[in-house]
Image (spheres, rainbow, N blue to C red):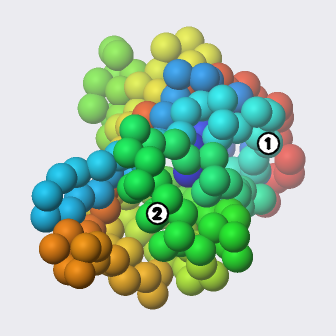
């Protein structure tokens, strides 16, 4: 999912023309992170991936702009579920089992469009939403995710959070110890993405 956010940042640096298709390259920085938080009736837990596991290569994405929205193409990404880590080994094992990591080793993520508004032109800060498609165990759902963006030179930082139910993907929370430990169906996805972005040029005039 980190890759996703890197792409979100990419798209924001669009040229003034609303009819040009543009290419951007993005390199996710190691101090980025993706965290999934869950809970039981007894405790909470976190499962996470750091930047070095999320993306090791530069990404290239084509973007267009229409009616204040930035649309992306060629941006479907895969996140290896077995690259997640946790301070709670049991929670991690249960998570991998729940998402059927052997049968579905990757989560599929695609950004459909971004809608951002400036909140501080002086600090180059923005807030808005990203419409993202997420596929888990072969089931695709669409989410409108609130995000914030800050830029510093060619480095762009995107933060976002989304609460969702695992039942959206046909998954059921597991109970442990004959029902004494009950796992919540709700999880929070938090991302902190730092991308180094460069413009590679116009692809075509539409």
The quadrant where residue 126 appears:
top left
| Residue in front for this viewpoint, 86 or 21 | 86
Q: Secondary structure at mark 1?
A: strand
Which residue position is annotated with label 1? 60
The quadrant where residue 186 appears:
bottom left
x then y, percent, for residue 133: 54, 69
Which residue appears at 64% of the width and 40% of the height? 54
- Which is in the foreground here, disc 2 or disc 1? 2
| Residue in front for this viewpoint, 25 or 206 | 25
> Nearer the N terminus, badge 2 or badge 1?
1
Q: Residues within 10 Å of mark 1 (few under 14, many from 20)?
A: some
Which residue position is annotated with label 2? 95
Which residue appears at 61% of the width and 17% of the height? 154
Measure the alpha-carbon separation of dots 2 and 1: 31 Å
Quadrant containing the C terminus in the rendered view: bottom right
| Residue in front for this viewpoint, 185 or 198 | 185
x then y, percent, for residue 5: 54, 44
| Vertical position of residue 73 compared to residue 160: above or below | below
User: Is mark 2 in CB contact (under 8 Å) with mark 1?
Assistant: no
């Amino acid at each position: 999912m980190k890759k996703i956010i890197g792409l979100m940042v990419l798209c924001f640096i669009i040229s003034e023309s609303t009819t040009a298709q543009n290419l951007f390259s993005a390199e996710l920085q190691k101090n980025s992170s993706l965290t999934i938080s869950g809970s039981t009736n007894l405790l909470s837990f976190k499962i996470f991936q750091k930047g070095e596991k999320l993306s090791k290569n530069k990404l290239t994405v084509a973007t267009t702009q229409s009616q204040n929205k930035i649309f992306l193409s060629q941006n479907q990404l895969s996140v290896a579920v077995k690259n997640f880590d946790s301070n709670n080994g049991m929670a991690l094992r249960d998570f991998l089992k729940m998402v059927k990591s052997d049968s579905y080793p990757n989560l599929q993520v695609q950004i459909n469009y971004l809608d951002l508004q400036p909140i501080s032109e002086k600090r180059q800060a923005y807030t808005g939403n990203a419409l993202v498609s997420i596929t888990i165990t072969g089931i695709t759902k669409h989410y409108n995710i609130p995000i914030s963006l800050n830029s510093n030179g060619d480095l762009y930082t995107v933060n976002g959070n989304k609460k969702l139910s695992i039942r959206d993907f046909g998954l059921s929370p597991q109970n442990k110890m004959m029902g004494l430990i009950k796992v919540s169906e709700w999880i929070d996805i938090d991302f902190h993405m730092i991308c180094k972005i460069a413009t590679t040029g116009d692809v075509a005039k539409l």
